[in-house]
Image: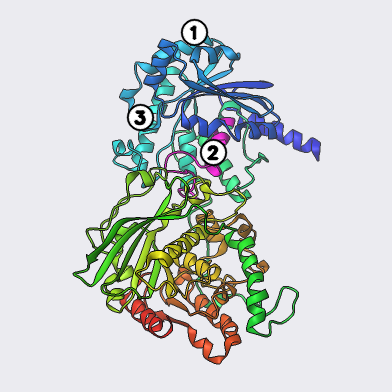
């Protein structure tokens, strides 16, 4: 078998060798670049090569945001402006600061030197010369033995807030096409080989992984993004196919690694156009209730050892913690509690709103010692009262989206600059989802913050949101982060002095409903929990497989849950729990599950079946306790309609 594998590897090598690819026992590569070359070569490239039996020495001359013009200016003046980051054959990276180009070019007998334009100018050919020509002459004079290769950069993510994106009308494909035109032109004129990272990224974006390769809309994330770029560099420069290369980052699933390998391989074969590599956007799911396979649900009233839960005390003291631990370890991930550094800054004192119906307050909930990371809470409470119960929920598009109040503060650019993706939306664009005036007129306060405050909804290698400020031992995904943020909002409401913090209902729609359920399950201070069309991973049974599935969620949104949850892709029967037990964690508090019949992707039947299966837990507190478990199904599609809030508020009037 070993001889056969060696033979096949040799055949693949012969078939896969690209024109110009360099074959050496130890290949020496120097990148003259910026953060985009940092993304590509400083991690994963050594490991990919090692797994393929190839030794590399890798150098990266790094200045963030460095253009060809600046590189040329540095070369001309021999300016020691660079961080020279070198990865030896042992994989150890050494960083030397204040390094000039001349010294780096003389440090090794480089086989390959790469050049690139800064990303924002990569699609503007008028910015290349005379600087590129001068850089080529400079490199050839100081490293005549080296081949010069062109590093093709990538287009920004849809919705990216990078200052150069307007050069391309904030259009990803327009930017991609401009980069392709410039990179192919450069390679034709100078005879460069091309490292088609930009096309590899676009190939991946055409799969069901979508935009999950950047951490801020332009820099590649530390999981699939940087791995993808390194794969592209390796195959382009060595000619050795990365298909089947056994190395992958530990946090990356094998399926996503396979997608990255295919995207890189296709880009090297077809460097200036997107290739359909399969792994399509559409995931086959069941939408026919008649095709739901028979299943048996775990019994929430059975301990892990099989013994029966006989009373509310046994549930509260033993079974509830047991289930909570299972959900933490296998699905949502572990998370910290209230941080010691938590503090509150009122940025708008109580101000009349809604024509005197309410009072508005806006608050920063700071969770770092420097108070530089925070959730911006928008709070309305009925005028003349300080004892109103509260509906607290995450919004998806910014506080200004929840109603047309012109005095809601817009997020400051600095707060979201680290995210890179936060497009502005019109004031009140999501008003129909919240019906704030109706809530206030019914005597309830309303509080919300944008989910992006806790973490933006894309796979960012845990570098943007609250995760980045806590120990890496915690395994939480975005859903758990958003839930954590809801608990911090409750921390503030307990100190606000203007509402009844003992009567806070946590609520959410769609993916925010998933977070609301987890927040309510973990944090028993929430007096009521409301799920609105939360679907799989929320209120819907995973085993009742209609519409969205665990596999679909983990494919489209790999950042939502912890890594352990991926074990249950197309393997729901192996789950040690199901979502009826998540709902049961709310007992004996009031829980309301709102579904929509035409939102089949969210599995409304599975949501209501979960609620029915959880009812036995409320019965531990007596038959009357089951009145605290409510719900409804409208005839709507995936949207909130007035009937939803009317029925939720009727339930709250009796139970909150």
Residue shown at 75% from the left, 74% from the top: 305
Local crowd at mark 1 within 10 Å, few (<14), some, or many (≥20)? Answer: few
- Asked if residue 469 lies in the magenta stretch, the reply is no
Q: Earlier in the sequence, mark 2 or mark 3?
A: 3
Which quarter of the picture shows residue 609?
bottom right
Residue assigned mark 3: 121
Residue assigned mark 2: 226
User: Mark 3: which secondary structure?
Assistant: helix
- Asked if residue 211 lies in the magenta stretch, the reply is yes
- As drawn, the label of residue 404 is none
Position of residue 642 measured from the top left corner of the image (x, y, whole percent): 31, 76
The residue stretch that appears in magenta:
207-234
Left or right: 226, with 294 as reference point: left
Q: Are marks 2 and 3 in contact (CB under 8 Å)?
A: no
Q: Earlier in the sequence, mark 2 or mark 1?
A: 1
Position of residue 284 measured from the top left corner of the image (x, y, whole percent): 53, 62
Distance between the alpha carbons at the discs numbered 3 and 1? 26 Å
Q: Would you say the magenta stretch is mainly helix, strand or loop?
A: loop
Q: Earlier in the sequence, mark 3 or mark 1?
A: 3
Position of residue 294 measured from the top left corner of the image (x, y, whole percent): 63, 77
Distance between the alpha carbons at the discs numbered 2 and 1? 32 Å
Distance between the alpha carbons at the discs numbered 2 and 3? 21 Å
Residue assigned mark 1: 141
Question: In this view of the protein, which residue sits in the foreground, 551 or 101?
Answer: 101
User: Mark 2: which secondary structure?
Assistant: helix
């Amino acid at each position: 078998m070993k001889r056969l594998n060696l033979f096949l590897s040799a055949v693949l090598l012969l078939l896969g060798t690209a024109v110009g690819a360099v074959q050496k026992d130890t290949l020496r590569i120097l990148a003259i670049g910026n953060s985009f070359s940092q993304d590509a070569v400083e991690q994963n490239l050594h490991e990919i090569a090692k797994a393929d039996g190839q030794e590399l020495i890798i150098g990266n001359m790094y200045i963030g945001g460095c253009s060809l013009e600046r590189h040329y200016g540095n070369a001309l003046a021999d300016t020691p402006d660079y961080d020279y980051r070198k990865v030896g054959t042992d994989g150890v990276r050494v960083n030397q600061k204040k390094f000039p180009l001349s010294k780096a070019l003389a440090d090794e007998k480089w086989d390959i030197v790469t050049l690139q334009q800064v990303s924002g100018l990569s699609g503007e050919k008028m910015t290349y010369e005379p600087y590129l020509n001068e850089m080529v002459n400079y490199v050839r004079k100081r490293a005549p033995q080296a081949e010069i290769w062109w590093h093709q950069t990538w287009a920004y993510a849809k919705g990216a807030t990078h200052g150069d994106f307007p050069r391309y009308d904030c259009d990803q494909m327009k930017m991609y096409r401009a980069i392709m035109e410039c990179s192919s032109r450069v390679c034709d004129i100078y005879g460069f080989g091309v490292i088609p990272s930009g096309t590899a990224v676009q190939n991946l974006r055409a799969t069901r992984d979508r935009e999950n390769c950047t951490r801020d809309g332009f820099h590649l994330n530390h999981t699939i993004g940087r791995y993808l770029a390194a794969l592209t560099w390796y195959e382009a420069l060595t000619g050795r196919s990365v298909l089947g290369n056994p190395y992958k980052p530990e946090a990356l699933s094998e399926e996503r690694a396979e997608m990255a390998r295919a995207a890189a391989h296709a880009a090297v074969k077809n460097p200036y156009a997107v290739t359909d590599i399969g792994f399509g956007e559409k995931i086959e799911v069941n939408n026919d209730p008649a095709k739901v396979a028979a299943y048996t649900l775990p019994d929430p009233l059975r301990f892990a050892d099989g013994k029966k839960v006989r009373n509310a005390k046994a549930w509260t003291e033993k079974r509830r913690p047991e289930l909570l631990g299972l959900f933490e370890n296998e699905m949502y991930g572990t998370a910290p509690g209230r941080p010691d550094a938590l503090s509150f800054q009122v940025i708008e004192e109580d101000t009349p709103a809604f024509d005197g119906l309410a009072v508005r307050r806006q608050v920063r909930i700071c969770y770092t010692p420097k108070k530089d990371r925070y959730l911006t809470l928008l709070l309305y409470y009925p005028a003349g009262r300080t004892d109103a119960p509260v509906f607290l929920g995450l919004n998806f598009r910014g506080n200004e989206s929840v109603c047309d109040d012109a005095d809601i503060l817009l997020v400051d650019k600095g707060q979201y600059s680290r995210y890179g993706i936060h497009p502005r939306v019109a004031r009140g664009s999501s008003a129909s989802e919240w019906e704030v005036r109706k809530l206030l007129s019914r005597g309830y306060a309303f509080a919300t913050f944008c989910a992006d405050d806790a973490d933006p909804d894309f796979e960012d290698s845990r570098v943007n949101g609250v995760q980045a400020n806590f120990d890496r031992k915690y395994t939480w995904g975005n859903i758990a982060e958003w839930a954590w943020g809801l608990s911090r909002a409750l921390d503030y409401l307990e100190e606000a002095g203007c509402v009844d913090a003992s009567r806070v209902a946590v609520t959410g729609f769609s993916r925010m409903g998933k977070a609301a359920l987890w927040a309510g399950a973990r944090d028993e201070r929430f007096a009521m929990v409301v799920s609105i069309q939360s679907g799989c991973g929320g209120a819907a049974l995973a085993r009742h497989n209609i519409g969205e599935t665990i596999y679909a969620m983990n494919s489209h949104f790999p950042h939502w849950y912890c890594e352990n949850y991926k074990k249950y892709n197309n393997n729901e029967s192996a789950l040690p729990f199901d979502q009826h037990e998540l709902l049961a964690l709310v007992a004996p508090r009031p829980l309301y599950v709102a579904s929509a019949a035409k939102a089949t992707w969210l599995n409304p039947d599975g949501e209501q079946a979960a609620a029915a299966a959880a009812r036995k837990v409320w019965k531990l507190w007596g038959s009357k306790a089951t009145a605290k478990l409510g719900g409804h199904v409208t005839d709507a599609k995936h949207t909130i309609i007035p009937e939803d809030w009317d029925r939720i508020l009727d339930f709250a009037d009796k139970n909150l």
